[in-house]
Image: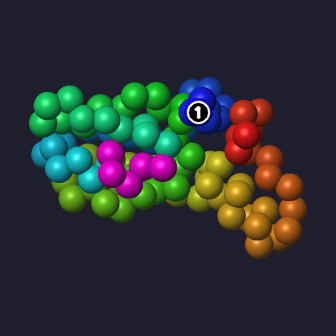
Amino acid sequence: MKAATYLKNITTLRYDSTKCIGCGLCVDVCPHRVFQMDGRKAYITDKDRCMECGACELNCISSAINVSKGVGCAAAVINSYFNKGEVSCGPECCK
């Protein structure tokens, strides 16, 4: 299955590898596999796949990850569900 990508170069995801302790929780919780492990450090595979759900930041025990939750695709999907509207967060979203 092809990974979803969203609007290019606009994600609020920030990652500081110097703070990473290698726990791997970001890899475990990310629904779009934005993070992978390389030895004892995580790395970002494709920042544009981030849907800004905030799971990585919430689970990062070393505060190496920051993302503005509620501004990306996840927010659009949730809002469309509650408002019973159409999802519109980007050209490749939710296919």
Left or right relative to 47: residue 79: right
Left or right relative to 14: residue 42: left
Viewer-side residue, 17 vs 22:
22
Left or right relative to 34: residue 49: right
Single out the residue that lies furthest toward the front.
Answer: 1
Which percent across, then down, holds residue 57? 36, 55
Which percent across, then down, holds residue 55? 42, 58
Q: Which residue is mark 1?
A: 1
Viewer-side residue, 11 vs 6:
6
Asked which quadrant contains residue 37, the reply is top left
Which percent across, then down, holds residue 88? 80, 47
Q: Is residue 19 shown to the viewer in this render?
A: no
In the displayed structure, 59 sits above or below 19; it is below
**Residue drawn at point x = 36 percent, y = 32 percent:** 44
Viewer-side residue, 92 vs 57:
92
Residue 1 on the magenta span:
no
Q: Is residue 21 shown to the viewer in this render?
A: yes
Which percent across, then down, holds residue 16? 26, 38
Query: What secondary structure is the stretch in magenta mostly built from?
Result: helix
Q: Quadrant of the C terminus?
A: top right
